[in-house]
Structure formats: C-alpha cells, structure tokens
Amino acid sequence: MKKKIFLIMMTFLPLFAAAQQEEEATENGVMSVADRNGFVFQTRKGDFLLKPYLLVQGTASFNYYDDEGLDKAYNQDNIANSGFAIPYAVMGFTGKAFDKVSYNLTINAAASGSNLLQQAWFDVKLKKSLAVKIGKFKTPFTHAYLTTLGSTLFPQVPTSLTASTILPYSLNAVTPNIATGFDIGVEIHGLLGGKFGYEVGIFNGTGSNTNNATKTFSDDWHIPSLLYAGRFTFMPKGVMPSSQGDPNRLNEDKLLFGISLSENVESESESTNDFRGGLEFAMLKNRWYVGAEAYYMNVGFTKRQKIDRSYNYWGAYVQAGYFVTRHTQLAVRYDFMDRNATDRKGLLNMPAVGINYFVPNSNLKLQAMYQYTGRTGHATQLDRDNDDLGLPMHTAKIMLQYSF
C-alpha cells in the first residue's frame, strides 16, 4: 500500500508547487549574492560575479542529564557535553555566470571528514519556472532546515528533527531521525506566478556524512535505493524570505503554507524504507515571526530483514519571535516528539525560550536559549526512563555569530 502511495506521489509531483527561495533573498543558504555588503567581484560586462563570504559561530553550552542511563560506577556525570564549541566556521564563495548559472562552494572548517564539504553545487536557470540544481545542498524537507544558516530563531533546531528514534532494543541498529539535511543529488525547481513553486529531487539518501556514490538497487521495490523527495508550498503574499527574523526586514508581510514528501529507499544498511511527510506554516508580519511544522516518519523493514512490522513516528513544533526593539528579538518554542513510536504510549515535550540581539553596524548576532525536556503519558516508568535516553533534561546555550 505504501509503495502505491509513493508511486502516485512521484507521478503527480510536478503538478504541485513548492516555495523556491526568492533570488534576492538567498542563493546558497548562507549568504546572498544580491546582498552587496562585503566583497563582490564582477566583470565589466557583468557576465561573471563572485562573492566570498565567511560565517563563524561560537557557543557556550550547559547540558544536564537525568540519572536514567548513567552508570555511576564509571563516574558518569549528570553534566556532559558542556563547554565551548565552534559548530560552524564556514568559508565559501558564491556567484553567477551569464545570468543563467548560479554556483556555490562552502567549506565548514569546524567539521571533519566528508562534512568538511558542506555545500558544492551549480544551478542552471532555464527559465523562471524551471531550473536544474546539481551537487551537495539542502534536501527539500522542513522549514527549520531550509532557513538560511545563521537566520534561525534559536541557536539549535527543534530536537524532534534531530533526535534518533527508538526501536525495540533488538532492532536498535536502525535509528533514523526525521530530518534529512544536506545530501548529494539533482533537483528541478521553479517559481510559478510569484506564489507557487516546486522542488523535486533525487539524492543519495546517505546525508552529509559521505561524498561518494555508495548506493545499490532496491531488493523490494526494484528501483535505485535513493532518496526521492519533494517540497511544495503556497505563498499568497509573495515569496517568503528564508529568515526567522531580520532587523533589516521589519516591514514584511508574508505567509507560507507547505507540504513535504520523501521516501528513502533501503536507507539504513539496506534494512529499512523510510517514508517522511511534513506540513509547515510560516509568517513574517512586521516585527513578528511565527512558524509551525508537523512531520511523520514510517520505518518499514525490508523483506530481507524478515521483520513483518513497521514503526511510525511523529513530531511537531510551534515557535514565535517578536522584535521588542529594532535589534532585540524575544523567542519562544514548544517542541513535541513521539520518539518511541506510536505503538507505545508517551511523548517528549520540549519548551524553550530565547533572546536574540543583533549588534548594530557590526554583522554580529548574539543568541541565548534555554530548553527543558519533559516526558508525559508513558505506560510504565521504564518506558518513561528510556524515552529521553541521550537527551539532556536541561539545556542552556549562548551563541555569538559573525558573518560578512
């Protein structure tokens, strides 16, 4: 049944519309060519344009874990994963050629291995309604991830997107999370009527951790074992900027409604087929930003695994930000996740508050947040204890960001 739904989805995918970020808003998810701040090099005729950029984030974090899962005999402490970090030290360049090709290369010096290459792509614009993007870039899924790096309301994305799921312990070698993030592939996209667009792509499905071709053919579906994804949105007031709050854009009036669908075929060492779906809403209204998403994932084991069961997970969040002054933004978020699958009772609920300060005339942004991880509705104390394993009960984070 799920295979039929997926094939119907892919058949009609091009008939739907998804928000493609406005050219003037961002081309690369980090820095915009249209933003003439910083260095911009171009030929006299304007045929070629190149813009180098830099974004550095430094954080101070405090994480307190409850006693479940800690072994005091090994001196495991309640306070862990705390201290100072540099999550991103991004260097790159972006540009255009002949007004048809956009390109971007981004290196994250704070990462290692294949993650050093954060993005590398070129985008061929055949016409406004049709373009082809090839390389390593953000997969078309979830508003939280598609927001420009450094322009998010909180210094960390919702936990419901990043936390690994929980399966029965005998099956815990497979622990996908709901977000898909960066990947290598090809995508067609376009903008129709200034309000509709589409993003439809095929990706490796291995995430940002590898830059190699490692996939095979599906034993169950007899198609390439890749990630097939699409994102569709409607923007009745014009294209939504890819920002969750910008002191230079306090007179916006934008709305976004979206849906995302994807299937990662034999995604976990040829063991599962992971279907994902998401709904999203975003609004920018003068000093207000409001965003909400709900997403669902079905983890279905392949026939080779001889497990005639599938597991369903969902998560959701709602968040809002308001500029109390031109440079100070208050933030609040409530995040939910059914981490132990719908066949078991119990939810994680994770409220968070924050404050953002955009230092005038400096390109500096200071963010601070606190998040609490709560548990509710579990059938047994053991289920309650297991549901938040690996997640801090209390999180506090301060982040300072500089970009040009």
Image: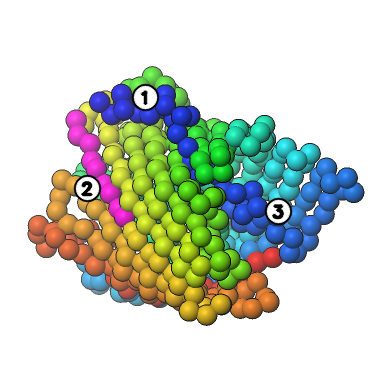
Q: Position of residue 293 (x, y in %)?
A: 36, 53
- What element does badge 3 sit on? loop
State the residue position of label 3: 33
**Closest to the observer: 267 or 246?**
246
Q: What residue type is disc 2 on?
A: Ala
| Position above or below: 329 against 11 | below
When asked about the image quadrant of residue 277, the answer is top left
Residue denoted by label 1: 7
Asked where in the image residue 316 lies, by quadrant, the reply is: bottom left
Q: Which residue is mark 2?
A: 341
Q: Amino acid at mark 1?
A: Leu
Disc 3 vs disc 2: which is toward the camera? 3
Report the span colored magenta: 308-316
**Left or right of 147 on screen, residue 340:** left
Q: Is residue 22 visible?
A: yes
- x and y percentages locating residue 9 in the rendered image: 38, 29
